[in-house]
Image (tube, rainbow, N blue to C red):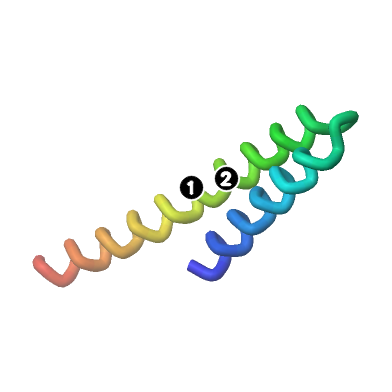
Amino acid sequence: MEKVRRLRAMGSLCRQQAAYNSMNKWKLLADAECWEYLAELELSSHFRECNLGYLDQLT
């Protein structure tokens, strides 16, 4: 979960920089979207592992 927090923090930093850097705004916003996507992948992977562990305990 720490990795998800760090990935989202990177996305937040990109969005903050985009607010102050009009020349690179769209690139920074695209970078932020990429970081958020990676965070969601990591989060879904984490919950998939948790659910598989839970199902293994039931059988």
**Disc 1 packing (10 Å; few <14; some 14–19; many ≥20):** some
Residues at marks 2 and 1 touching, judged by CB atoms closer than 8 Å:
yes
- Considering only vertical position in the picture, is 42 above or below 34? below
- 45 sits left or right of 5 in the view: left
The amino acid type, in three-letter code, at marker 2 is Glu
Q: Quadrant of residue 57?
A: bottom left
Q: Which residue is mark 2?
A: 36
Separation of disc 2 and disc 1 at Cα? 6 Å
Label 2: which secondary element:
helix
- Considering only vertical position in the picture, is 40 above or below 52? above
Question: For this rendering, which residue is in front, 30 or 16?
Answer: 16
- Extreme residue toward the front, this view: 20
How far from the left and from the top, in percent, is residue 40? 48, 47
Question: For this rendering, which residue is in front, 8 or 57?
Answer: 8
Query: Residue sitting at 53 percent across and 60 percent down?
Result: 4
Q: Which residue is mark 1?
A: 40
How far from the left and from the top, in percent, is residue 11? 65, 49
- 32 sits left or right of 38 in the view: right
- Considering only vertical position in the picture, is 26 above or below 17? above
- 59 sits left or right of 24 in the view: left
| Image quarter hosting the C terminus | bottom left
Query: Residue sitting at 82 percent across and 42 percent down?
Result: 20
How far from the left and from the top, in percent, is residue 18? 77, 39
Q: Quadrant of residue 53?
A: bottom left
Q: Quadrant of residue 45?
A: bottom left
How far from the left and from the top, in percent, is residue 16? 73, 47
Query: Residue sitting at 33 percent across and 55 percent down?
Result: 48
**Disc 2 packing (10 Å; few <14; some 14–19; many ≥20):** some
Query: Residue sitting at 70 percent across and 43 percent down?
Result: 15
Q: Which mark is residue 12?
A: none
